[in-house]
Amino acid sequence: MQKEDLVEILGPRPFAEKQTYEEIVGQGPLDEDTTLPPGLRDWNKEPPAEAKTESS
């Protein structure tokens, strides 16, 4: 089956078709805000030694 066959059977898509990589993956502008919320800012850092608890 080709795309034209599907259009003939199902009709045109109810939304615009995405043609470029950027449209498909949804990459936004480079100036978008990518800062983490306060609770996630230190997600990749070790907690302070006094905050660690030993499990028995």
Image: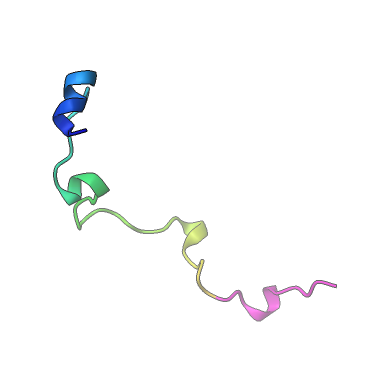
What residue range appears in magenta? 46-56
**Depth check, front residue: 30 or 11:** 11
Residue 4 falls in which quadrant of the image? top left
In the rendered image, residue 50 lying in the magenta stretch gets the answer: yes
48 sits left or right of 24 in the view: right
**Depth check, front residue: 1 or 46:** 1
**Depth check, front residue: 7 or 25:** 7
Position of the N terminus, as image quadrant, is top left
Give the residue displayed 24% in from the left and 20% down from the top. 10
38 sits left or right of 14 in the view: right
Residue 47 falls in which quadrant of the image? bottom right
The percent position of residue 25, horizontal first and vertical second, equals 26, 49
The percent position of residue 50, horizontal first and vertical second, equals 69, 78
38 sits left or right of 23 in the view: right
Q: Looking at the picture, does residue 1 appear above or below residue 35?
A: above
Position of the C terminus, as image quadrant, is bottom right
Direction front: furthest residue: 1
Question: What is the chief secondary structure element of the magenta stretch?
Answer: loop
Does residue 26 appear in this view? no
Count of all numbered marks drawn on residues in the image: 0
